[in-house]
Image (tube, rainbow, N blue to C red):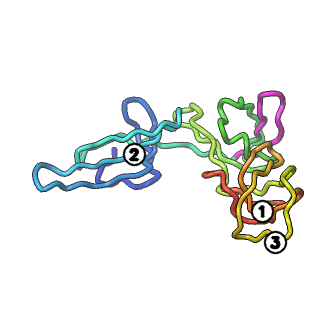
Amino acid sequence: MISTNDFRTGLTIEVEGNVWTVVDFQHVKPGKGSAFVRCKLKNLRTGGVVERTFRAGEKLSRAYLERREMQYLYREGDSFELMDNENYEQTSLSGEQLGDNVKYLKENMNLYLLTHNGNLIGVELPNTVELEVVATDPGLRGDTATGGAKPATLETGLIIQVPLFIDTGTVIKVDTRSGEYLERA
């Protein structure tokens, strides 16, 4: 059990049979009445974010997630083959289970499978990945790093906005949390 006074960003809790992670929280002490904790919770199964209010000091069940390091091997149709780095067992996941993370997967990439009580909750990717630009408009003379942005298609099929000086064949770093261009690799 964990008290709402001990909330911090990234904490996983169990509320009404669902597993949630604390995205944001705020302790509020009004002039009248008792204190309360207002927080944003993200459902780890569906990805939905809701706002909830709890009384200060209220006890909730803490959800313990098991993180297993896996290596992405290859894609076969709509299934993605992963290998456990400890015992070399292979696991197959569907594109639906991976969600938007499919856009960042590269062969031989390490990631974490998150499970709760033996049920798959989600996949945790590294914060950044290096991907090659396979298609973009050519850069023009006079393009600068602070100029504008243009769409670029990456090797995984992901389309993001990149600075004007990026050309086809350039390897760039992409933030997997926001899907934004970071820098050239």
Residue at the disc numbered 3: 142
Seen from the viewer's position, the closer of residues 45 and 12 is 45
Q: Is residue 125 above or below residue 91?
A: below
Residue at the disc numbered 1: 164
Category of crowding for the residue at label 2, using alpha-carbon neighbours closer than 10 angstroms: few (below 14), some (14–19), many (at least 20) = some
Q: Main secondary structure of the magenta part?
A: strand
Determine whether, in the image, residue 181 is placed left or right of residue 76.
left
Name the residue type under label 3: Gly
Name the residue type under label 1: Leu
Determine whether, in the image, residue 60 is placed left or right of residue 77.
left
Residue at the disc numbered 2: 40
Q: Which range of residues does the magenta coloring cover?
A: 70-82
* The magenta stretch spans residue 21: no
Q: Residue at x 39, y 45 (%)?
A: 40
Which quadrant of the structure image shows residue 163? bottom right
Name the residue type under label 2: Lys
Residue 182 percent location from the top left of the image: 69, 62
Category of crowding for the residue at label 1, using alpha-carbon neighbours closer than 10 angstroms: few (below 14), some (14–19), many (at least 20) = many
Q: Is the C-beta separation of discs 2 and 3 under 8 Å?
A: no
Q: Is residue 71 above or below residue 181?
A: above
